[in-house]
Image (spheres, coloured by chain):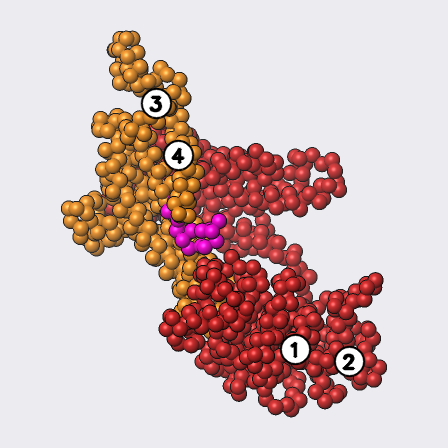
Amino acid sequence: MATFRLVVRRLLSSTPFLFLVSALTFVLVSLVPGDPARTIVGQHATVEQYEAVRGRLGLDEPLPVQYGDWLVRVFHGDLGASLFSGEPVTSVLNNRLPVSLSLIIAGTIVSGILGVSLGLLSARRGGLLVKVVDGLALLGLAVPAFWFALVLIAIGSVQLRWFPVTGYVPFADDPAEWGRSLVLPVLSLSLGAVAIIAKQTRDSVLDTLGRDFVRVMQANGFSQLSILYRHVLRNAALPLVTVLGVVLVNLLAAAVFVETVFAMPGLGSLTQQATVQHDIPVIQGAVLYVTVLVVIVNLLVDLLYSRLDPRVRAS
Amino acid sequence: MRRVLRRPVGVLALAWLVLMTVATLAAPLITTHGPLDQDLGHVLAGPTSDHLLGTDNLGRDLLSRVLYGGRSTLLAVGEALLVFLLIGVTLGLASGFLGGWVDWLTVRTADLLFALPGIIIVLVVLSVFPGNLHAAMITFGVLGSPGLIRILRSQTLSIREELYVAAAKVAGLKHHQILRRHILPRMTSMVIVQAALFAAIVVTIQAGLGFLGLGAQPPHPSWGGLVADASQVLDRAPWMLIPSGVPLVLTVMALALLGDAVRDAAVEGWAVTKTAAVPTAAHAVAVDAPATTEEELPSEEAGLLSIRNLSVEIGGIPVVQDVSFQIAAGEALGVVGESGCGKSVTALGILGLVPGGGRITHGQVLFDGVDLVRSPTALAKVRGAGIAYVSQEPMVALDPTFMVGHQLAEAVRRHQRCDRRAARRHVTELLDLVNFPDSAAVVRRYPHQLSGGMAQRVAIALALAGRPKLLIADEPTTALDVTVQAEILTLLRTLQAETGMAVLIVTHDWGVVADLCHRAVVMYAGQVVEQADVEETFTRPLHPYTAGLLAANPHLAREGEPLPTIPGTVPTPRDWPIGCRFAARCALSDDACTTQPVPLAEPLRGRLTRCVHSQRLLVEGTPA
């Protein structure tokens, strides 16, 4: 029940976020120099034809009314059609979504496992591993995903020929090839996230190890394994979960580049193409999808947090 | 700034950034090749003396393209940074300083923007204003500013709190004057740190846009465009990734490291003003001196626990020296002294848990005849089962993420090796023992749902799970309300009487000692200064420090008279003198006190004191 209330409350509080982002996008798009109606009817159309198209597109209405109309259509699942291919935007986006999701979910899992183990190891061992994690954190910030992806292709695909250079094989076609086609993209995507997670894990594990309850447990003979893996890790996970939101936004951004490099038909590469082609309805739709994704991720983070921390659950 | 330049990393980072900036601006002076000059005879050539970084697939000089390409990076960083600082500093300061609806609105908006993937919004802008990198960078500056706003806001809030006091006295200062004179200067290093980190991100993003074909249009060079060029010839000339990518990576790294260096330098700056007056070398010798004079223990039957000449160092500095005392089975011993005298360190040292990365440098901790300092396996077995521990702050002594019952059951199962059901029964018994009649309700609670007194009783139950022979309680009542204090003391006394376990209680409260203990050990500046039965300690203290502490006891205060205090403070371990460490605060001190270390004397049987004038005190009594 408490969980249900939390979900409802979070969804309600993220509504303004969705509206703000969509309104922002809408206003931006309305600034487009040139006139979509003119573009559609061409230079030689009559005034009547031009006005008809303007009326059909709703362009003669004031901006808030246009936004309202757009919202109503969105609620009916109508995001318009791509200016480039004429396909409905929703179907374009829905086709692309699974690719991005598999990339991002795999990236989250890989960077979570690598980052937490690295951070935990460096907190436990200290010494050289501390330097390694610090160095990695710096590299994660400094090495852009697109360049790292190319380096991985140069080594893993061109030199060693272990992985396909580009492309994406849908899971339904061939699960093994699907996995192989994901290895390099996921690695390129994860570098930045691994760095953030490893550093955060180390810091918060060290912080937790210094807390009173750990000393009390040690003094009263609790087993070292239980102290570290049950009690310290669980407490250290709390600040870690809060950076998860940041990490995911990071992954979403990196996906734009990684999908483009590996020619994967995902939301990121779609946004890039639509930007190059000035395909405004597609861009608007992509922003909406990404924003909803961010809202969902933040909701999941909150739920996870409340599962881990009884103090949040109670209030 | 000077502190930044004292760090090699900071110098290197700054040098690289200056070098890149100058080289970019002075590109025509450095290379004779134009960025667009094609030399189709030398296509994809490796580094030569003519082309230091090689050429691309059209034979264009890569060094020239990197340098000329850097110009658009420089411009982008400038634009984004300007917007970032303008918005971030203005709104951050305004939000923290003015509060009210300005603050409300700013924080909400910043939170919203913070959750957005900036690159997507920048792509929207670029689809609306094709090829307009200026618009993209300004947008990115706006999207980045919430980070700076948040940090400056919280900083301003905390500084403003300090300023209220001063501002009330010096009335008449205008807002902008306070801002300019008091707040802005303290923000500078923080703003530089944030600006450097943001610039690092801008360089990456600008390169990313160039890579996606949304930056400078070919054939004009940009760093991202160079990587894109390299990606076209990945199979033929993979080395092109190096000249195209490495300058980019190094520049981002330099910005990040510069930010780190400024932050470290600022932190160091604050730390220096805090501990500036600490002398070191001269005193280190003095500190070592008494450690060499190992004192003979008064012969006494070895008790349950016998600490012999225990010395502890934290960070290479001795904090406890030559501490010896015994506890017999079933005895209650109080360790008394002001804060910073080494009581808690001694107590935790017994369990091998010296805080702050410290270590035992000397001495023995004999428990049932086994030296715990030298036998980690014995120590591991003794913890919880032989010696248990209750800490000072009950509210943080339990894991906040597990239910009380779960933690107690874990302790029980660790020590009793029993199944779940037996463990549950044991937990109920333990809770019963610490006066929780309704244990079923308590086990399902989380630590934050307990009051201080309840939490301390649970902590005591946890310590009793292994049926210890000795309970170490480190100021178990200090953090509690007065009424609850009495309850916990009564509980400890009852438990001690019923179970027959020995208790070592660390405290600065004579009331606790009188209530609970048979004997008292008084510690001052890392040493034992007096040791005696509680009654004798109260009636005839043989050390001026003990006498001073007793006189300062609020329980004995007479109405209408000011509470006597001991002038001065406990010296920090670095400042311990050669002679009597209490001399500086002592009414009896003379030359004999300060020339050499004072040994523990036994002027009466069973009474130990570390005072030069102990004979005099014995005859005349202490000056109260």
Instruction: Judge depth for marks 1 and 4 and give the one in front.
Output: 1
Kindly identify the amino acid type of the residue bearing the numbered disc 2. Arg
Is residue B534 shown in magenta? no
Chain in orange on the image: A
Q: Name the residue under label 2.
A: B540
Task: Tell me the chain of label 1.
Answer: B
Which chain did the renderer colour red? B
The residue pinned by badge 4 equals A18
Question: Residue B191 lies in what quarter of the image?
Answer: top right
Depicted B303 relative to depicted B274: above or below: below
> Which residue is nearer to you in this view: A242 or B459?
B459
The circle drawn on residue A69 is 3
Task: Please identify, in this view, whether the residue under mark 4 or under mark 2 is nearer the observer.
Answer: 2
Q: Name the residue under label 1.
A: B517
At mark 1, the secondary structure is loop
Numbered disc 2: what chain? Answer: B
* Dot 2 or dot 1, earlier in sequence: 1
Residue B71, percent across and down?
42, 36
Q: Disc 3 residue type?
A: Asp
Magenta region includes residue A300: yes
Q: Kindly report the distance in space between the C-alpha atoms of the residues bearing marks 4 and 2.
A: 77 Å
**What is the spatial separation of the Cα atoms under label 3 and label 2, in whole angstroms?**
92 Å
Dominant secondary-structure state across the stretch colored magenta: helix
Question: Given this view, does label 3 or label 2 mark the residue nearer the observer?
Answer: 2
* Chain ID at mark 4: A
Picture coordinates of residue B590, whole percent (x, y): 82, 77
The amino acid type, in three-letter code, at marker 4 is Leu
Q: Which amino acid does label 1 sit on?
A: Cys
The percent position of residue B322, horizontal first and vertical second, equals 63, 80
